Image (cartoon, rainbow, N blue to C red):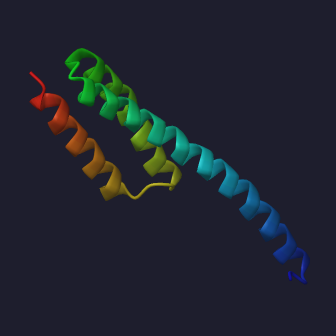
Amino acid sequence: MANTPQARKRIRRNARRTEINRDRVSRIRTFVKKVEAAIESGDKATASTALAAAQPELARGVSKGVLHKNMASRKFSRLTKKVAALA
């Protein structure tokens, strides 16, 4: 158990940050799932629109520190390839 005021405060801050970061990651996953669903349906217009919406979300996740830069880049690259393959 935390014995110092600083440790108690750190526990409170960590709990708040964890909740915020969980919400951020959940939001990003939702945007990515929209792209994947559009790819599955074969609708290129919807997929490219969803991809354009997902890209800034991935970038925001990187800038906020909830996603690794390379992971977001890889995810965006793979989704872009799949959307481009739709014809």
Q: Is residue 73 left or right of residue 85?
A: right
Residue 73 sits above or below residue 45 on the image:
below
Report the label total.
0
Q: Quadrant of the N terminus?
A: bottom right
Residue 86, position in %: x, y?
A: 13, 26
Residue 57, position in %: x, y?
A: 44, 37
Residue appearing at x 38%, y 37% in the figure: 32
In which quadrant of the rendered view does residue 78 lie? top left
Residue appearing at x 82%, y 77% in the figure: 7
Residue appearing at x 24%, y 15% in the figure: 45
Q: Residue furthest front?
A: 41
In which quadrant of the rendered view does residue 50 lie? top left
Q: Is residue 36 left or right of residue 58?
A: left
Q: Is residue 46 left or right of residue 87?
A: right
Residue 30, position in %: x, y?
A: 47, 36
Q: Residue furthest top?
A: 45
Which one is nearer the viewer's eye here, 85 or 52?
Answer: 85
Q: Quadrant of the C terminus?
A: top left
Residue appearing at x 20%, y 23% in the figure: 42
Which one is nearer the viewer's eye here, 49 or 38?
Answer: 38
Residue 83, position in %: x, y?
A: 19, 30
Q: Is residue 54 left or right of residue 21?
A: left
